Image (cartoon, rainbow, N blue to C red):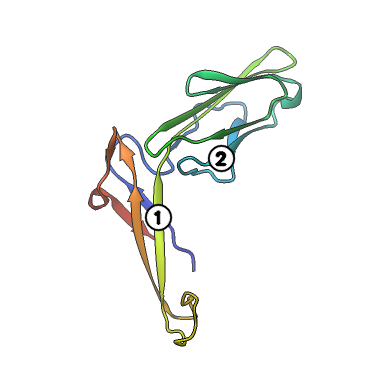
Amino acid sequence: MVVILAASWAADSAFAQFDFGVNSDNFFIELSPTDAPGPNQSVTARLSGFSFDIDRSQITWTRNGSVRAKGAGIKTFPFTTGIIGSRERLSVVALDADGIRHEAELSFTVADIDLLWQAETSVPYWYKGKALVSAKSGVVVSAFPNLISGGRKISASNLIYRWT
């Protein structure tokens, strides 16, 4: 059973909110291990594209307004996200072998939502593990959002939850 939570509110930022910028030449930034990193998480940004040879390009990585890496063919950039509510902005400029400038940008606000689940099943009294979901059993999922906008924690009651 797969449970997906979408949380949104009227403020400027949202969980997993990304701004990919204008991208006319299929040159973009991907995050690994996830596209929605949490607070203080180690992440690697990776360049992808097929409209020019990235390996032979002079690449400049900028994070939150300061140059962090610069050189030929630097396709990956490891970093650690900030605290909850902080804004992360990655910009990349690649100057290809023909002298053409290519740009990509990715920005997001760091957020966190804990999802706890409980299966509506039973287990023997001696079983020390968690009761697991079985066919046709119910599941109770509780969301505990930890979202900050404008320096203030957003109340869970001010969010809109869409369960799928």
Disc 1 marks which amino acid?
Answer: Asp
Residue 5 appears in the figure: yes
Residue found at x 39% / y 44%: 15
In whole angstroms, how far apart are the C-alphas of marks 1 and 2?
Answer: 18 Å
Q: How dense is the environment of label 2, judged by Cα within 10 Å: few (below 14), some, or many (20 and up)?
A: some
Instruction: Using the image as rendered, state which of residue 157 and residue 146 is in the foreground.
Output: 146
**On the rendered structure, is 29 left or right of 140?**
right
Query: What label does residue 114 carry, if any?
Result: 1
Question: Residue at the spot x=71%, y=26% of the render?
Answer: 54
Q: Nearer the viewer, residue 164 or 55?
A: 55
Where disc 1 sits, the SS reads strand
Q: Residue at x 56, y 33 (%)?
A: 79
1 or 2: tag closer to the N-terminus: 2
- Quadrant of residue 78 in the image? top right
Give the vertical position of 111 relative to 114 (above or below).
Answer: above
On-image quarter of the C terminus? bottom left
Instruction: Identify the secondary structure beneath mark 2.
Output: strand
Q: Is residue 133 above or below residue 110?
A: below
151 is higher (above) or lower (below) than 131: above
Name the spot of residue 23 as percent of width and height, x first: 55, 27
Q: Quadrant of residue 121?
A: bottom left
Three-letter code for the amino acid on which mark 2 is drawn? Ser
Q: Which mark is residue 42?
A: 2
Q: Going by the image, does 4 lie left or right of 44?
A: left
Residue 82 picture quarter = top left
Q: Which mark is residue 8?
A: none
Q: Along the horizontal axis of the image, is 127 left or right of 145?
A: right
Q: Is residue 56 left or right of residue 151?
A: right
Dot 1: few (<14), some (14–19), or many (≥20) neighbours within 10 Å? Answer: few
Residue 118 pos. (x, y %): 40, 71
Residue 164 in sight in this render: no
